[in-house]
Amino acid sequence: MIGAEPVDLQPIFYPKRIAIFGVTDTPDRVGYNILQSVLYGGFTGKVYPIHPRHQEVLGCKVYKSLADVPEPVDMAIICLNQHATVETIEICGRAGVKGAICSAGGFRETGEEGQTLERRLIETAEKYKLPIIGPNTLGMINNDGNFYSTFYPLNIPAGKVSVISQSGGMGLTFIHQAIDEGLGINKFIGVGNCSNVGFADCLDYLENDDSTQVIGIFIEGTSDAARFARTAGRVARRKPVVVYKAGRLKGADQYTQTHTGASAGSYQLYRDILHQHGVFTVDNISELVVACKALSLQPLPQGNRVGILTHTAGPAVVMIDRLKPAGCVIPALKDETISRVKQIIGVDDPPVVLQNPLDSAGLGFSRPIYGGLADAMLADENIDLLLAVYCLHQTWELPAAELISAYRKNNKPLIVNFVGNWQGCRPDQEFMQQAGVPLFTAPEKTAVAAAALVHYGIRQKGGDSSDSK
């Protein structure tokens, strides 16, 4: 945070002219890969690579210094070592550059000498009110502006979820799992060491970013945990925030401090404070992706009453194990619903127990019957959210169209768990998620998705979820 004033991150996310310091013609160097990332990502602004000895890299003219660039630039990407990075921030500040990304490590995460160097970096940046993403960062992505600046060239599906990650590796893990889940990403911010732009500053920006609907966070630790929790809680009143806090073991500080220079702090204390501020927390990166996916696709439920429709009992049992500690209840079906179920099945005394979870057994293999049962359960006044489980099979097609029809008719949240693999389910995943219905292939993921929806559904109505997460 630069002083007490809000940080203007708009020039970093939506630059029109960028300078890239340290561009080389060697593909195994960071500068080469960042230039490639900018070009591959489809950036439509002007790009000015800078290096004193090169004339052209990747078809772009290279300038010897920032002074040689023919017009002012909005933002700088600095791909130099830690000592040159500090010097370059001074050059950028004097030239009126409005923001910078500093990729180099070697700062406070390395010990006393690095701490001194990072203090110089911060002092220089704050002298010019120059916000810095990093140092020690993978970079950032803005799909809304076709701006990619990571040193892993990517081009990923766009969506409504923005991600803040302290770790580049965990950020990439989120991105690739999101691709597998069919989840589009709006913005990715690798905050790294959080020198003068931290989690709270990024949350402040994303709160008012119309293209961001849901915010996911991976955090190891922060020097201002109180501000982070307060800001996350405030933002979560406008749009869902999901947090994965790492460093749960005693003594985790020795690992996080040599990674990003951050103190991990008490894992449980973070969880408790975030919960007090109404923020939904998860236990791993997979759950972070799952929760963000559900929140970005589905409307919030009106309550915490969850219905489960299945033709195999085991997944329902696993779901209940995860749902009840998260404040969800599994209500009884209304008498009218039970009567309707009998009509749909066509048997007055069916060989199934007519209750919630509704296990239709072999009768539910039929797509029309399964779709009718989903419609009946969604129409039940006791049900706020339905989880539907169906197994991938060579003979029986997945009832994707029937489930979408029931969802549209009843306008209640629906999450689908197809027991199978992505290779077999991919067409249905794309079909359903284009209609706004999230599809998962594991009951644990389905339950976490439901818990996230219930958490923010209750919060939106002014209640308090008893979710321990």
Image (cartoon, grey):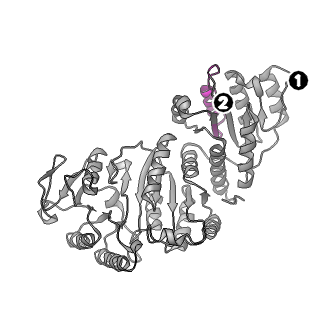
Asked if the magenta segment contains residue 412, the reply would be yes
Q: Earlier in the sequence, mark 1 or mark 2?
A: 1
Relative depth, front residue between 205 and 181: 181
Residue 275 is marked as none
Say if residue 431 shows up in the picture.
no
Q: Say above or below: 336 vs 22.
A: above
54 lies left or right of 28 = left
Picture quarter containing residue 49? bottom left
The quadrant of the rendering that contains the N terminus is: bottom left
Disc 2 marks which amino acid? Cys
Of all residues, the one furthest to the right in this rendering is 349
Taking the spot 48% from the left edge, 50% from the top edge, the residue there is 174
Q: Residue 285: x percent and y percent?
A: 54, 53
Taking the spot 80% from the left edge, 32% from the top edge, the residue there is 337
Picture quarter containing residue 77? bottom left
Q: Say above or below: 162 vs 255.
A: above
Magenta extent:
394-416
Q: Residue 4: x percent and y percent?
A: 41, 77
Task: Report the Cα–Cα distance between label 1 and label 2.
Answer: 25 Å
Residue 349 is marked as 1
